[in-house]
Image (cartoon, rainbow, N blue to C red):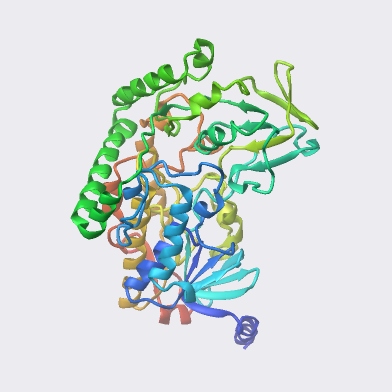
Amino acid sequence: MNEHHDDEHHDDEHHDDEHHDVLIVGAGFSGLGAAVRLRQAGRHDFVVLERADDVGGTWRDNDYPGAACDVPSHLYSLSFAPNPRWSRSFSPQPEIRQYLRDLVARYDLTPHLRLGHDLLEARWDEATARWRVRTGQGSFTGRVLVLGTGPLSAPKLPAIDGLDDFAGTTFHSARWRHDHDLTGRRVAVIGTGASAIQFVPRIAGTVQRLTVFQRTPPWIIPRNDRPISGLEQWLYQHLPPARLAVRAGIYTARETLAVGMTLQPPLLDAVAALARGHLRRQVPDPALRDRLRPDYRIGCKRILLSDDFYPALARDNVELVTDSIDRIEPDAVRTADGRRHPVDTIVFGTGFEATRPPIAAAVTGRDGVRLADAWADGMSAYRGSTVAGFPNLFLLIGPNTGLGHTSMIYIIESQLNYLVTALSKMDQHGVAAMEVDAGAQHAYNEALQRRLGSTVWNTGGCASWYLDANGRNTTLWPSFTWRFRRLTRNFDPRGYHLRTEQEVAARCTPQTPVR
């Protein structure tokens, strides 16, 4: 009697919730890609919850000067939603953002979008086998929750003494202050990663003084970006085999890098020679060149592409500082050698919270366990997609799905295959709740870590954002991407606990995992 009364009260608390079969969080490549695939599969009962007032994800947020992709354009688009009209071989941020906006119109996704809906809490309700999601603008329930927020959505700021006392303006490159004119200012850039090497050349000519603080020099190879001619665009639009051939060629060339990164790191020596030649040609000053020369194996950190970063550092108004930062003062950055570097603006190019995603703190699974707590010792998932203790939860670009050599779109599409086929299996067999077995997840990840042990990311002699606080690589996929595609081509119920709607209604315990 009491249990029945509690259930009625519990349901009353949520009777105004908007219910859908699938709730997708995030409207970047992952979230919109999921929406398109669901539509193509004949599924229309879903919504996309997005915290911002527009779609685009990382390509909406990272609109700093010079922002562009470092994967060739024809490989950086969804294969089931091609774009034959890229203007350059490496597409700039405004075009990528527009491509994502065009997806909304092309596939009539507007009715499914819930913009301005910042995820506050997502909680699994064991009694009803539903996810209950609370946002800043309303609450939702759904059978399945898909997290498409990505690893590059939460900017990371370094803990530097005195930062709160700085009297000038500070911002992260992913939150660029376009209202703050840098003309004639003394600007400090902290970090020399993938974002900094793009915006530093764009602002170097307008600021009075630019001081670039480098902790570890990156390996940089030529970008060789070029316009795509009108004739090429016409061919790609009217002769799809030509576009597909270019895409396949780019994919194959990029995939060869995986051999050196995951199997035989010495094979990357040819790429290192290319990078060293690039540095030698672009930086004639031997003293500056020495400070820009990496002392770790290429590929250990992300390999960067640029034709204008080195020349920007050689400008008279630009200084490269390699001494560590001691503290921030109200009007300067003080380094460990005692020097004061007067600045009035600090721009952080310091990356993202890739190994400790903040959204994990907002997701609570079975038995009241938060995803952040489940990942307290490091992120872990089964095939990068599902997590024990979190039924009906799917991750896109989850743990150990990142890449150091090719397009993340390929990984996203692979995980979308897994999602769509899982939904189909659930429908066919009347499955209300599915959860990966903890043992299966553990075995999968132990095998991944063994493979990662011999990769360039773990043996290359560098510290990178690929590794978590415990030195464990929880971000990258340690093999060829076609192997990940094969793993995720279809949902395989082996290793999962499955419960039917009748079992949920009867509040049965999970079945023995299917073997």
Judge from the rendering whether residue 301 lies leftward or rightward of residue 353; answer left or right: left
Q: Residue at x 53, y 65 (%)?
A: 366
Residue situated furthest front in the rendering? 230
Q: Residue at x 40, y 26 (%)?
A: 298
Q: Position of residue 197 (x, y in %)?
A: 51, 33
Q: Nearer the viewer, residue 87 or 492?
A: 87
Q: Position of residue 410 (x, y in %)?
A: 33, 51
Q: Position of residue 222 (x, y in %)?
A: 38, 29
Q: Position of residue 347 (x, y in %)?
A: 65, 37
Q: Residue at x 63, y 38 (%)?
A: 348
Report the number of discs: 0
Q: Nearer the viewer, residue 139 or 442?
A: 139
Tell me if residue 208 can be seen: yes
Q: Residue at x 68, y 32 (%)?
A: 187
Name the quadrant of the N terminus: bottom right
Q: Nearer the viewer, residue 362 or 179?
A: 179
Q: Quadrant of residue 32?
A: bottom left
Judge from the rendering whether residue 227 lies leftward or rightward of residue 120; answer left or right: left
Give above or below for 367 relative to 170. Answer: below
